[in-house]
Image (spheres, helix red, strand yellow):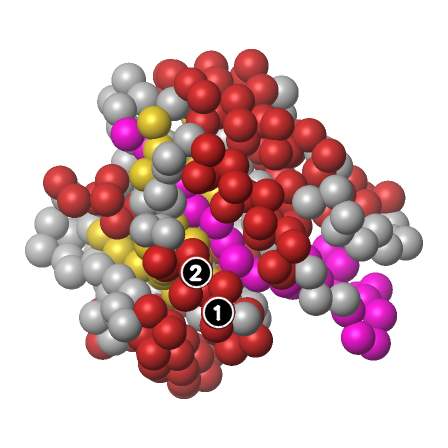
Amino acid sequence: MINAMVVDLEHWHSNEFLTDYLPAEPVDQIPESVQPLLDLLDRYNVRVTFAVLGSVAEKHPELVKEIHDKGHEIASHAWSHKTLYALGKEDFDDEIRRSVDLLTSITGERPVGFRAPSFSIDNSTKWAFEILEKYGFKYDASVFPIKTMLYGVPDAPLHIYRPSKADITKEDTDGNIIEFPMTILKIGKNIPIAGGFYLRVLPLWFLKYGIREVNKDRPVIIYIHPWEIYSRTPRLKVPMFSQFVAYYGINSALRKLKGLLKEFEFASIRDVLTKY
């Protein structure tokens, strides 16, 4: 089975657990943190989705073009990395318009995929689907079927589906937007194995086990941020819990990702969804 992989191309200081402790001018390490990931994907001849933050594309258009020219899909990650809860409908519309215009001008191709900052699509922000449809998006990959202190739609389907605009936990077979929810392994309760922090904290053997189990009936989606696999990501003095969530496993994440690429097939979200 071919699984999906998405790289959230954003600054290391977009991490919600660090924002209250940032220096006045955080260092920009986008190009150097992305390169090891691009090299790894080239080594395994894998083309994935890069969900690009508008503010990153504005500062590094040549990098976005390079990623696109290598055959990777360029999707939108909005513009500022503010959550949809903070933006509201009008400002979200503006961010999506700016994102689509910029990414199209860089790549010559309109993005068809979206990933919300901090997985901030739930029933309180379901208006996002109207806006995504307005700008020609075909899929979203933002719904996380668990509940955490930051995000989550615990009652959402675990499989790929078309959400109802009235209730995103319900399916609408006539819906225009396809939802690829973050991967959950159900063992009594929902265990997230979708990537990011969960990739960093869970042992590789368990990630492999989880993917094999989920692959019995559906593809998985794995996500990663470049700063999560880059050993030189700045370490700030933050409370212990924030330090754990932000930094645990950074030094081993690239090795784990390599282990997954060796054993499973991955492609862009767009390519995995061609049959849906």
When the figure is inspected, residue 170 is found, relative to residue 189, above or below; the finding is below
Left of 271 or right of it: where is 122?
right
Residue displayed at 73% across by 55% down? 17
Which amino acid does the dot numbered 1 rest on? Glu
Residue 111 x/y as whole percent: 29, 65
When the figure is inspected, residue 263 is found, relative to residue 175, above or below; the finding is above
Left of 2 or right of it: where is 31?
right
When the figure is inspected, residue 104 is found, relative to residue 226, above or below; the finding is below
Q: Which of 18 and 57 lies nearest the eye of the viewer?
A: 57
> Which structural element holds mark 1?
helix
- Is 226 inside the magenta-drawn segment? no
Name the residue tied to disc 2. 66
Circles 1 and 2: CB atoms closer than 8 Å: yes
Q: Quadrant of the C terminus?
A: top left
- What residue span does the magenta drawing correspond to? 2-26
Q: Which of 237 and 34 lies nearest the eye of the viewer?
A: 34
Q: Quadrant of residue 121?
A: bottom left
Q: Which of 41 and 252 lies nearest the eye of the viewer?
A: 41
Which amino acid does the dot numbered 2 rest on? Glu
Name the residue tied to disc 1. 62
Q: Which of 33 and 1 lies nearest the eye of the viewer?
A: 33
